[in-house]
Every structure is written in C-alpha cells, then in structure tokens.
Image: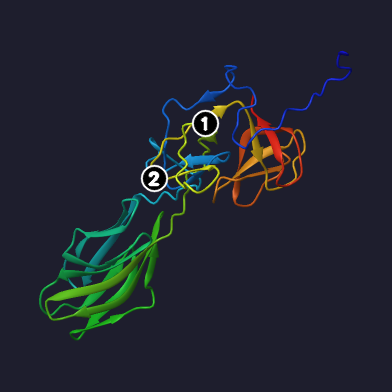
Amino acid sequence: MALQSTVNTAYAKGVAGDMVNPGSGQNVFTPINPIADGPVNVGSFVFPGSDPYTQASNAATVENAGSDTYAIACTPSAGTAVSGNVTVANDGSQVILQSSVGSINQTASGATSGTATVSIPVGADFAGSITLAGYTVGTVANGTASIESDQTATSTNSSVTVSAVSYDGNVITVTFTATWTATTKRTAVMGFVVRVLEYPNYNLTSEGTLQVPSGYGLSVAVKGAFYAVSTTAATVGQSVFASETDGSISTAASSDSVSGSVETDFVVKQGGAAGDRIVISNL
C-alpha cells in the first residue's frame, strides 16, 4: 500500500460542543459544575444564573437587587415638619416598598413595579406642603389636599410617581407607584458548554439531544478548543460573540460590536458559512 502523499491540515469535523483535543489537558473547566438555570444548549455560551455561584443560564440574567431611599415630609405653614423616608427595594424578584414615616400599605407588587399608600399622621388643622425627594407633590389648604405638578422623583435604580394626595383631618395619605428602572445584566460570560456523554436524553423518541434540561449539571469550559456553530459566516481570526438572549455564537472583528451580544475571549480557528461547524479557541 502506498504511503499517503498529502496531509489534511483541517480539523476533522465534530459535533457542536465537542472538544477538538479531548484529554489533552488543554481544556480548563469551571471549578464546580454549575446547574442549568432553565434549559441550556450544548455548544453555546452561558452566563451566571439566578444564583450566580451555582447556576448557569443561556440568557444574561437581569440583576434587580438593590434599593433607593426617598425623603418624604409633610411641612406645615408654621411648625415642625413630619418627615422620614420611603424606601424602594428589589430582592431580585419583586419590588418592596417601605416607609419610616407613618404606615404603608403595599397594594401591588411585581418584578419591575409596586404601588402603595403611605399614611402620615399630621394632626388636625394641617396646612402646608408634601414633598418627596425635595419635590413638592401636594399641598393642603383649608382642609383639602391637592396634587401638584411635581409628581415624579428619580433615583439610581427607580422612580416614584405620586398619583393622589388626600387629607382626612388628621392623616395625609400619599398614593404612589415605584418603577424599577435598573436594567443591569450579568453579562460576564461564564464559559462554553461542552458536550459530554453524561447529559440526559430526556426526549426518549429523539435520536439524541443537545439541550440540557433545567436542574441538571453542566460541563462548562473556560479555556480550550471546541467545535461550534455560528449564526454568522466565520473567518479565521474573528472574535467570538455570545448572545445575551440564548448564548448562541456569532463572529465579527474584535474592533466591532454585535448588538445584543458580548465579546468573549475565544477566536475563530477554522471558519465556515453561517450554520456550519467551526472551531473556536482561546488557547
């Protein structure tokens, strides 16, 4: 048999998520295998999940936790103001409204907004102004409260809009809605989801699966060379970008930006048309 006369320098094609050099010691993984936060596609990038220390997700998670404090005061025409704070907080899942002046009744809550009334005891015959974060939102005159044009205050993470002000002869009630405006995302890429035999095939009628169901462990590489599929045409040397929505791959020059995606430290080592298998590496 004749000796081969040529050597093909291209990589042998593998399945998206496969290691180019398995067992070579070049591939580095996260110290702890994260748990899939929702279904995760093999051969895609993942971001920190709802629990950034133990979970990974194909989508960049919006970080809502935090709080803002708004000063609120009822200042009579003569005398000492009744003052305190209204706090707008978010525990990562819902907006929580609190008050240090008078009682508060939260009537609605969601991930991005909450509505409440705060009742401030001012006593009889009050006449004066109601301020929120320094803005005059209402006045009381002749026993009747009215809302003013300055109705909205803003802070770092939120805004508060007053919709009604009332006075019953002893207590001023302010109705307001707090909107959480912070949209910070955990956009630091955790790594690339590698294809391993331990992944479950949870659809028993299918030939196989490249999606890991929520709650299962993932093998996430932070360094190595891997087969992948790009949504765009890829050429050698281009940077690899990860979609913030589904972790899918696109490529572009390192000086470019891709809308809705973040640049990773991987580059294209073997290119191809959109939808073809390519090789990406950060070695």
Q: Are marks 1 and 2 in contact (CB under 8 Å)?
A: no
Location of residue 3 with respect to 192 vertically, above or below:
above
Which of the numbered marks, if any, corresponds to residue 50? 2
How has the structure been colored for display? rainbow
Residue 38 point in image, percent of width and height:
43, 48
Q: Is residue 101 visible?
A: yes
Residue 24 point in image, percent of width and height:
60, 17
In percent of the image, x 54 and y 42: which residue is there? 208
Q: Name the amino acid, label 1.
A: Val
Residue 253 point in image, percent of width and height:
73, 40
Location of residue 43 with respect to 66 vertically, above or below:
above
Residue 239, quarter of the rendered image = top right
In percent of the image, x 28 and y 82: which residue is there? 146
In percent of the image, x 63 and y 52: which residue is there? 259
Q: Earlier in the sequence, mark 1 or mark 2?
A: 2
Label 2: how many residues lie within 10 Å, few (<14), some (14-19) or many (20+)? some
* Element type at mark 1: loop
Q: Is residue 43 left or right of residue 275?
A: left
Q: Name the amino acid, label 2.
A: Ser
Residue 272 point in image, percent of width and height:
76, 40
Residue under pointer 1: 196
